[in-house]
Each structure stands twice: as structure tokens, then as C-alpha cells.
């Protein structure tokens, strides 16, 4: 199994029989940032699945719908908040036939796409998180599901966010996850580690990839220094750059 950190919250997971890509967007889509990550080249004979957790520019890029010729076995699993009307697609030179290759998903639902069992969790921001079972593996991608706790936001707002985060993760507490992609966002200041720490305490995952770091990769080392539990730190992957490849 090969995992490529492309950038931000985008990862490619290459398995024996398929490739999964999560929350890809082009590097110039977000104002103020330049992301240099590139999509790997996948085997044209294998299915490729693009997941998008929600419509934000740092999680979804309309251009992924233009990859149908490059990858004839492509399929898209998109959160329902991503609206793709006929006129919108045509204005962006995307044929309407692409909608046949899209599965739109809502929160707290179960779907089967080919051999994949997909459960969606309700995000505390927009859209969904993905829990996927395929090829005897369990993969979790948080999207923007996180304990978005901000200084000065007040107990009511922060409390509602924390309750929503804990409620969503209860769906994962009795499961064994092989790969988990979990938010670690330095913009939260003193609360930066709070969501990841709760995940580590309540979810059993073999490999944890922090994401949504806005290129502040030192946040991983900072967390590991703070954490005295070696059972946690040894499972957290050290991301240091875009296009970093992990052979697992």
C-alpha cells in the first residue's frame, strides 16, 4: 500500500486493485497559498475513486471532473453540498455525461460503490467525513470534521462544536482503522492539538496522518513533544513536505 501526501488535506492511497484520492484541489486555488503537490500517475486499468468531503476550495476542485479520459475507470464520491447543475458544468466545459460517474452522498448514511462500503459522518463544518471499507482495510478521512474550538468564540459555540465532534467519532470507537487522516490546524492556537488528542484517545487506528496544517508541518513534531504516550506518537506519520510518499 502506498500513501502519497499531495498537499493540505489531499492524499492518494494506492491499493492492490484501486486508487483512492481524497480532497484534491489545484495548488493555486486558495488565496495566499501556493501548494506544489501533484497527483500521482495511476494505472489506467485500475479503478480510480475521487472523494470530496465538501465544496470548500481547499477540498474540492471542479477540474477533477476533467480526468475521465485519462482514467476510464474513474468514479467520484462527492458530498451533496457540491452542486453541479447542467449549466454550470457546460460553462466549465465539462460534459453532462460525467454525472453518471458521480455518487453524491449525505451525512450519516451508508453507500456501496463497487466493492467499497462507505459510511459518511456529519462534519462539524461543511459536508461529510468518510469511513471506507475495501480490500480488508478500513480508511477514515475527516474532511473538515474537527473540534473547531477558537479562542474568544465563547463556551456556547465551542461547546456545540465539541459535542458534534465527539458524537461523530462515536461511530468509529468500536472499529479498527488502518489509515486515518485527521485534522491538525495551527490556526486554533492553544486548542490546536485538542481534536487530534481526542481522536488518539478514542479511536483505534494503525497509521494516523495529520492534515489541514496549512504547510505548518512542525505541528506534528510539536504534538509529539507534548505527548508522553509512546503508543500515540509511534502511530503518527511524520509529514514534512508535499508529494511525500509512504510505503506501508
Image (tube, rainbow, N blue to C red):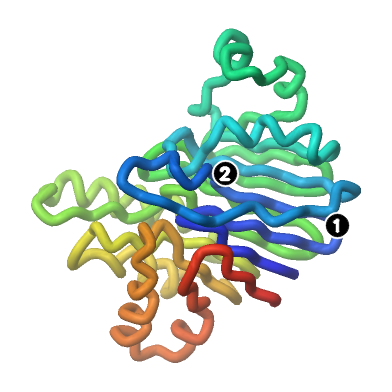
The circle on residue 31 is: none
- Residue 20 percent coordinates (x, y): 70, 52
Q: Secondary structure at mark 2?
A: strand
Say which quadrant the N terminus sits in. Answer: bottom right
Res. 124 image quadrant: top left
Q: Which mark is residue 120?
A: 2
User: 38 left or right of 27?
Assistant: right
Residue 176 visible, this angle: no
* Picture residue at 66% right of the left edge, 43% below the top: 50
Residue at (73% x, 64% y) in the render: 137
Residue assigned mark 1: 17
Check the image and report above or below for 70 versus 232: above
Which residue is at 71% across, 15% downward? 96
**Position of the C terminus by quadrant:** bottom right
Q: Point out residue 109 in the picture as x, y percentages from the top left corner.
A: 60, 38
Q: Earlier in the sequence, mark 2 or mark 1?
A: 1
Q: Residue 133 appears in which quarter of the rendering?
A: bottom right
Left-right relation of 67 to 34: right
Relative to 51, 41 lies left or right: right
Q: Secondary structure at mark 1?
A: loop
Q: Which residue: 60% across, 54% down?
A: 38
Amino acid at each position: 500500500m502506498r500513501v502519497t501526501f499531495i498537499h493540505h488535506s489531499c492524499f492518494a492511497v494506492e491499493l492492490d486493485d484501486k486508487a483512492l484520492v481524497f480532497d484534491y484541489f489545484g495548488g493555486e486555488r486558495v488565496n495566499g497559498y501556493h501548494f506544489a503537490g501533484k497527483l500521482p500517475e495511476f494505472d489506467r486499468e485500475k479503478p480510480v475513486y475521487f472523494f470530496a468531503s465538501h465544496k470548500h476550495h481547499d477540498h474540492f476542485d471542479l477540474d477533477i471532473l476533467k480526468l475521465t479520459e485519462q482514467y476510464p475507470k474513474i468514479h467520484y464520491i462527492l458530498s451533496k453540498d457540491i452542486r453541479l447543475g447542467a449549466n454550470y458544468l457546460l460553462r466549465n466545459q465539462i460534459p453532462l455525461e460525467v454525472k453518471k460517474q458521480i455518487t453524491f452522498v449525505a451525512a450519516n448514511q451508508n453507500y456501496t460503490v463497487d466493492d467499497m462500503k462507505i459510511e459518511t459522518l456529519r462534519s462539524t463544518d461543511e459536508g461529510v467525513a468518510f469511513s471506507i471499507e475495501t480490500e480488508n482495510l478500513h480508511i477514515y478521512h475527516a474532511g473538515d470534521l474537527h473540534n473547531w474550538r477558537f479562542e474568544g468564540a465563547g463556551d456556547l459555540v465551542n461547546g456545540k462544536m465539541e459535542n458534534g465532534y465527539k458524537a461523530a467519532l462515536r461511530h468509529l470507537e468500536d472499529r479498527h482503522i488502518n489509515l486515518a487522516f485527521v485534522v491538525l490546524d495551527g490556526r486554533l492556537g492553544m486548542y490546536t492539538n485538542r481534536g487530534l488528542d481526542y481522536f488518539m484517545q478514542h479511536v483505534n487506528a494503525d497509521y494516523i496522518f495529520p492534515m489541514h496544517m496549512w504547510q505548518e508541518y512542525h505541528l506534528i513534531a510539536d504534538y509529539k513533544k507534548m505527548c508522553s504516550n509512546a503508543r500515540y506518537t509511534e502511530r503518527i506519520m511524520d509529514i514534512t513536505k508535499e508529494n511525500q510518499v509512504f510505503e506501508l
